Image (cartoon, rainbow, N blue to C red):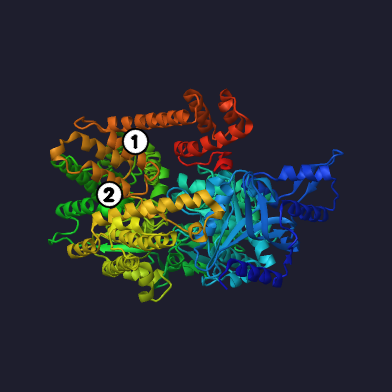
Amino acid sequence: MNKEAQIEESLIANLIDLKYNYRPDIHNKESLENNFREKFQSLNRVKLTDSEFARLRDEIITPDVFSNAKRLREINTFIREDGTPLHYTLVNIKDWCKNEFEVINQLRINTRYSYHRYDVIILINGIPVVQIELKSFEVSPRRAMQQIVDYKADPDNGYMNSLLCFMQLFVVSNRTNTYYFANNNNAHFSFNADEQFLPVYQLANEDNKKIAYLDDFAEKFLSKCTLAEMISKYMVLVASEQKILVMRPYQIYAVKVIVDCINQNRGNGYIWHTTGSGKTLTSFKASTILKENPDIDKCLFVVDRKDLDRQTREEFNKFQEGCVEENTNTETLVRRLLSEDYSDKVIVTTIQKLGLALDPNNKNDFKKRLEPLRNKRMVFIFDECHRSQFGENHRAIKEFFPNSQLFGFTGTPIFEENSNYKKIDGTIGYYVTTKDIFQQQLHAYTITHAIDDKNVLRFHIDYFKPEDQIEIGSKEYKIAVVNTILQKHNSATNSRRFNALLASASINDAIEYYELFKEIQSKKRADDENFLPLNIACVFSPPANGDRDVQQLQEDLQQEKEDNKVEPEKKKKALQSIIDDYNQNYGTNFNIGLFDLYYQDVQQRLKSQKFSNNDYPHKNKIDIVIVVDMLLTGFDSKYLNTLYVDKNLKYHGLIQAFSRTNRILNDTKPYGNILDFRQQQNEVDKAIALFSGEDISKAKEIWIVEPAPKVIEKYESAVENMKQFMTRHNLVLDPSEVYNIRGDTARIEFISYFKEVQRLRTQLDQYTDLTEEQKEKIEKIMSEPELRAFRTSYLETAKQLREIQEKEGDAAPDNIKDLDFEFVLFASALIDYDYIMRLISKYTQVKPEKQKMTREQLVGLLSSTSNLLDEREDIIDFINSLKAGRSLSEQEVREGYQQFKIEKYINQLNSLANKHELNPTELRKFADDIIDRMIFDGEKLSELFEPLNLGWKERTKREVNLMKDLIPLLKKQVQWHEISGLRVYE
């Protein structure tokens, strides 16, 4: 059963078995609205007049996905014709299971310029809440996702002008693989230029076994009450971002097991969810669901003060605005604990504030004031419970609130093997573990699960060993480390597309590394004008000197805390010097007194790596931050992919540090890169064994990427497959032969074969441990110039097929419509805008006989990358326009190119004006107005042709011909963003 129609028929049959009411009579906008009206009147026990219903319909249908999601979940008010208010809900929000569930298919909604057809839609009380898009077996579900995104981008689409505006979830499936994701406003709902795809999910059971087959998915996920619970309970509306989140399966199971444990009063427990899995959302959701439990007096969500930098505060406040105060205010905590106001039932606080509130020696006598709560039923949920929960604060909570239940979340539990906390019981000493504190593990989602789910990346670990026997920690050793990093950094970070941390063993080591980078890079720059230094920053906590904020910061920075006890003034002076350099490099104005702001700025610049160098020049970014303890836990950035390690790490410290590198981005980031200068393979194996939750041999297969020889074999096989494909078409394996491939079907085959070649080459290019023999073999399989030429051929072919996709839309042949080009694989981080401008400048400054790169080679280099795909033609024309012998600085090249583009655009408009017999000034004014407003105005187009005194038939014909020529120019000027109203001419 591979055809879409058959899959659709089977799905509807399954939903009917699940007691859905199938409504084949609902097939357009009118019948959808009539059905909703009937359900609305029945639910709210009201009879609306036609004009009242029309007004209600127009009031509730808006393009704002977020406000619609709120309206769906709330009691709303409508003023009737007689002036009386009608308080209504769109669905039964008290008991979602008691709503009426219906299924419709092949709904057609007309847009302003075309119609859209929707495969299967689920209605709750007449409101469309789930859309299911189906594809045949051989098509990637990602194409169905793209179709939904395209539909939503169409002006005046059904999601804007009909009841489809209430859509909550999308499901896409080719029957074998099924995914789901939340609807959102366009800011959170797009496949952008970097192909960072929507957050999509696959269903899984409690043990994380995937439920991907559509029939099984329907039974488990689409049963009426399960779906109702998902929409009402496990979708989170983030007001600060106007964004909708849907919780992942493991997050939902964790919430449910905590709620059950409380309802059954089964003691304490902990949730083991790996770093990067969204523990904060899970724990916060659990605490808010408990707000509905009448048996619970208070629920406290407890976090560690160390984490309350800007990033974490913002994350907490996303879920409940203003729930975490920036300052330490124990008085507010005590007042909220004593409050009987429903809004104070769930409280977010820090472990430090809680400790002060329960301190019997506190002068404010907080503990005595809290005495009325002693026997109340309290629930405490601890975020990252392995940190502060092993000390006095934890014991104080248990003693003061004997009827409390405590739940902890951790990505790296403390077992006996990795415990540093020793408890003495009489004469017997033993280590305290997470289980000792929280009694039982309630749910696990380990890093093994997360890697398997592609929620985080695997690791590539290069255990570096210097050629000479050098003592670890010596200056010679550090010089070798710096030189190795400078040699390998471009490869490790995909030509600086990503950035890195260097974890050093002490503050003194961090300072020494910082100075060595300055010294060695300065020398390299003096020896080679083409050397591009890395932007190096360094961050470690200053001596506390009684500063409570710094003291709290250092509670989990044990190495830095100890280091600062020795020669604190010397370290303070070094840190100020580092900050001074930072100020000079980045135009900032920080000092040690503003350390927290400096630290936040470093984090923000690490994250700014996401911006292209065209938008945000590389000089503003950071390539490497040298650290001791800071940033090795809690810091998340998709654009950090490499960790250089020159410190001893083990168990949870090792996993936390490695996990800074493994956030998912796209295929340009295939894994997290670790360069370990201390040869800690034994410690890595022990950490994997402890935290994998799996057999060690199986876990290593999941955690660690394949060794280079295996990937080289796959690469060789992929090139051979492409060679055989070319042979079947009577062609040789040569880039120029790609242009001789006949027929779209064959071109699509080439796209598929070469994508696999490029994907494997991208992985190999980031291996930092390739031997010279391996590099030679890779080059022999396909040389770099040959690969570059094939990329050019691929991009030309893909561009032609993409134009058919865009031009014909749903009318395009299925094999083209369903094609996924994955242009991100061909985006060179090296050949970016900065690089090309710099290269052009160098090209002009060297005499022809001494040029290393010809004009043709420069054009060929540019043609081999996709990241300047839409601008490539202009840059090539600019290069060809340059006069021989005229030397240009990089700034002159940049300014000259921008001026060239403006002149080229004006010349193209003038040519169009001449071709269509129009006034050039008026045509430019017309085009500029469209670009400024991003709206096409048909009346102004008619005004443009008025001086020609044409009949309506001839004028219409001339208008169509002009727009056919003008649209590509307009789209290029707005970087291919949607211009409202243009589709009528496309």
* Amino acid at pointer 2: Ile
Residue 692 vertical placement versus 641 (above, below): below
Q: Nearer the viewer, residue 937 or 103?
A: 937
Q: Is residue 883 visible?
A: yes
Residue at the spot 48% in from the left edge and 69% down from the top edge: 435
* Amino acid at pointer 1: Asn
**Pointer 1: residues within 10 angstroms few (<14), some, or many (20+)?**
some
The residue wearing badge 2 is 507
Residue at the spot 44% in from the left edge and 62% down from the top edge: 745
**Pointer 2: residues within 10 angstroms few (<14), some, or many (20+)?**
many
Q: Nearer the viewer, residue 338 or 975?
A: 975
Percent coordinates x, y for residue 65 in the rendering: 62, 47
Left or right: where 718 falls relative to 486: right
SS under mark 2: helix
The residue wearing badge 1 is 591
Label placed on residue 233: none
Q: Nearer the viewer, residue 576 or 243?
A: 243
